[in-house]
Image (cartoon, helix red, strand yellow):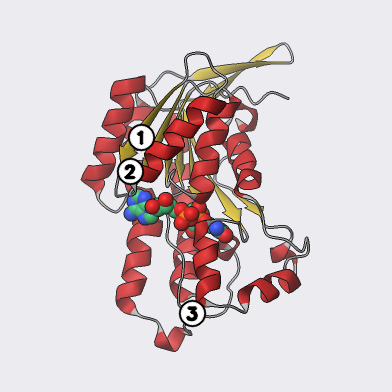
Amino acid sequence: MALQINGVAIVTGAGSGIGKAVALAYAMEGARGVVMADLNIEAALQTAKESESVATNPIYKPLAVAVDVTDAESVDRMVAAAVEKFERIDYSVNSAGIGVKHHKPVDEADIPEMNAFWKVNVLGSLNCIKSVTKVMKSQSVTTLNSQGKTREVGRGVILNVGSCNSYIATPDIVPYTTTKHAVMGLTKSAALDLAPHGIRVNAICPGWVNTPMVTAAIDGNPDLPGMMKTVIPMSRIAEPEEVADVVLFMTSPRSSYVTGVGWIVDGGTTLQ
Ligand code: NAD
């Protein structure tokens, strides 16, 4: 089943890990444009360069943009640059995020650290939703022809990146678990408010994924790899491409009636 991805994507956090794999997957799957946005512009430029060698749409173009998702004006500039180059935004993936480096129990939770997590993991996604929604609401509705029928697909799709910690708690990572639960609340609220406008909003909720964020977490907690093996039923962490493939389906016309849900991609971790 072809995903029928042929529009324009914005991916935040596209310089590394899951965001990078998602940006490259859009290029591979046939997007006509991908905006790689990241705090680290050098990393975003690198993803943009790599995307050109894997893109399958003959008119494919990348655009690397520096953005700080915690700053609403910076996000508006990112969206304006995307519209100036590509004229519409079909898929918006909010993968910019921060993870825990030092584990602490709740009674030692650090308030400045909590605020920093809130600003990036929750307000960052909200800033992006607010800005892309202004563009998506004014766009024409796209359609999909399937099995001899034509169906309305909508004006755009937004995908937030939660975590299996959007559903469960694991010890000593209060800022992460709290903000990832909030990402699901934001996803459901946005899905409800934007459904009448033909905009779908969903979340992807991964378990451990092989990215620099997890490498940093292991540096701060050497017991983590052993613990991962015991709690993941599939006995391995995910590769970022395994998450990206689900993101592409969730934002493709093939999932045109799915909104307000979190799709857990965790090798069975939350089953027990
Ligand atoms: P990563 O550290 O590899 O990549 C995160 C990217 O976000 C980096 O390129 C960084 O520069 C960018 N970024 C950080 N703050 C930013 C800001 N203020 N503005 C713009 N860009 C910013 O991490 P990752 O593992 O790819 O994580 C991506 C998302 O996936 C995060 O939301 C994370 O919480 C989530 N997640 C990761 C895992 C995992 O195991 N890696 C599991 C579940 C959820």
**Residue type at tag 1:** Ala
Residue 41: give its label.
2
- N-terminal of the two: label 3 or label 1? 1
**Residue type at tag 2:** Ile
Residue at image location 69% in from the left, 75% down from the top: 226
What is the CA distance from the residue labelled 1 to the residue labelled 2? 7 Å
Answer with the quarter of the image where residue 228 lies.
bottom right
Residue at image location 43% in from the left, 33% down from the top: 48
Quick check: marks 1 and 2 in contact, CB under 8 Å? yes
In what element is the residue under mark 3? loop
Compared with 12, 142 (above or below) is above
- N-terminal of the two: label 3 or label 2? 2
In the rendering, at what x and y percent does residue 269 appear? 70, 64
In the rendering, at what x and y percent does residue 29 appear? 60, 26
- N-terminal of the two: label 1 or label 2? 2
> Which residue in the protein does label 3 denote?
103
46 or 154: nearer the eye? 46
Compared with 45, 254 (above or below) is above
> Which residue in the protein does label 1 denote?
64
In front: label 3 or label 2: 2
Q: Residues within 10 Å of mark 3 (few under 14, many from 20)?
A: some
Residue furthest to the bottom: 107
Residue 252 falls left or right of residue 20: right
Q: Quadrant of the N terminus?
A: top right
Q: Can residue 205 be seen here?
A: yes
In front: label 3 or label 1: 1
In what element is the residue under mark 1? strand
Q: Can residue 124 be seen here?
A: no
Quick check: marks 3 and 2 in contact, CB under 8 Å? no
In the rendering, at what x and y percent does residue 185 appear? 47, 57
